[in-house]
Amino acid sequence: MANTASAKKAVRKIERRTSVNRSRRSQMRTYVRKVEEAIASGDPAAAAAALHAAEPLMMRAAQKGIIHKNTASRKVSRLNRRVVALAK
């Protein structure tokens, strides 16, 4: 348990940051799931629109340190390949 004032403040800051990170991660996963569902439905236009909405959220999560930059790039790349393949 935190004893000093600075340690108590650090605990408060960590709690706030954790809740923000959890919210962003959840939102990102929701949008990625929407892309997956659009791909599964076989609708290229919906899949492209869903990817267009999901990509900025993934890259922003990478900028904020929620996921690694390379992880975000890899996921975007793989989703993009699947959307392009669907359009062909």
Image (tube, helix red, strand yellow):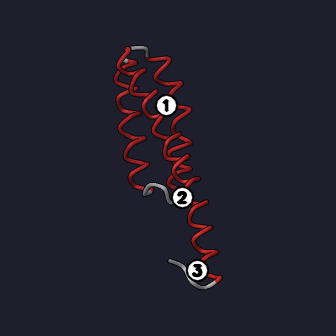
- Labels 3 and 1 touching (C-beta < 8 A): no
What residue is drawn where x is 36% and y is 32%? Answer: 81
Mark 3–mark 1 distance (CA, rounded to whole Å): 41 Å
Q: Label 3 amino acid?
A: Ala
What residue is drawn where x is 46% and y is 22%? Answer: 47
Q: Is residue 63 above or below residue 52?
A: below
Q: Label 1 amino acid?
A: Leu
Identify which residue, 56 or 31, lies in the foreground.
Answer: 31
As helix, strand or loop, the secondary structure at mark 2 comes to helix
Viewer-nearest of labels 2 and 1? 2
**Circle on res. 7:** 3
What residue is drawn where x is 55% and y is 58%? Answer: 64
Q: Residues within 10 Å of mark 2 (few under 14, many from 20)?
A: few
x and y percent of residue 11 in the render?
A: 57, 71
- Labels 2 and 1 touching (C-beta < 8 A): no
Q: Is residue 52 above or below residue 8?
A: above
As helix, strand or loop, the secondary structure at mark 1 comes to helix
| Quadrant of residue 44 within the rendered picture | top left
Q: Which residue is mark 2?
A: 18
Q: Is residue 21 above or below residue 83?
A: below
Viewer-nearest of labels 2 and 3? 3
Viewer-nearest of labels 3 and 1? 3
Between disc 3 and disc 1, whose residue precedes? 3
Q: Which residue is mark 1?
A: 51
**Circle on res. 10:** none
What residue is drawn where x is 37% and y is 47%? Answer: 74
x and y percent of residue 45 in the render?
A: 49, 17
Between disc 2 and disc 1, whose residue precedes? 2
